[in-house]
Amino acid sequence: MAKPAAGATSFTIDGSSYALVGNVTYSPSSIKREALVGIDGHQVWKETPTLGFIAAKIRDLGLRVEDFNKMREVNVSVTLVSGKQIIGTGLGCVDTQEVDTEDATFDVRFEGMDVTEIL
């Protein structure tokens, strides 16, 4: 029987759990690579450093949403239903948080240099 591959089961920031609604996305990538092309075809690769990220939609269950905007140098952890863990250390919350009052949800995105996957 195949193990489940999609879905997340937990979301924590500095060890505190938050009500995860869904839409978790992440990138452990540290390099953005693009091909540079001339009239004779592919010539060389351009590599630019990029930050990894962990993003999620969470529910406002009595949180101080404004506190997320102040978060920097935090550790973020996501456990996927497959058992894989996504760990980000020293991340900062970017963007602004906008609460959808119809379902009390908001998006958070944390970026930084250290986002890794543990199988």
Image: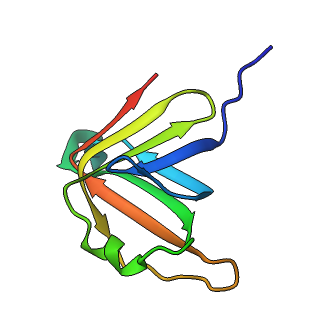
Quarter of the image with the N terminus is: top right
Residue for point 65% across, 42% down: 7
Task: Name which quarter of the figure residue 2 lies in.
Answer: top right
Any part of residue 40 in sight: no
In the rendered view, does 106 fall on the left or right side of 104?
Answer: left
> In this view of the protein, which residue sits in the foreground, 102 or 32?
102
As drawn, 117 above or below 36: above
In the rendered view, does 57 fall on the left or right side of 49?
Answer: right
Residue for point 50% across, 69% down: 107
Task: Name which quarter of the figure residue 29 lies in.
Answer: top left
Percent position of residue 49, x then y? 19, 49
As drawn, 33 above or below 59: above
Percent position of residue 87, x then y? 36, 39
Percent position of residue 26, x then y? 44, 48
Residue farthest toward the top in the current orientation of the protein: 1
Task: Name which quarter of the figure residue 72 lies in.
Answer: bottom left
Residue for point 53% across, 82% down: 99
As drawn, 68 above or below 8: below
Any part of residue 82 in sight: yes
> In this view of the protein, which residue sits in the foreground, 50 or 91?
91
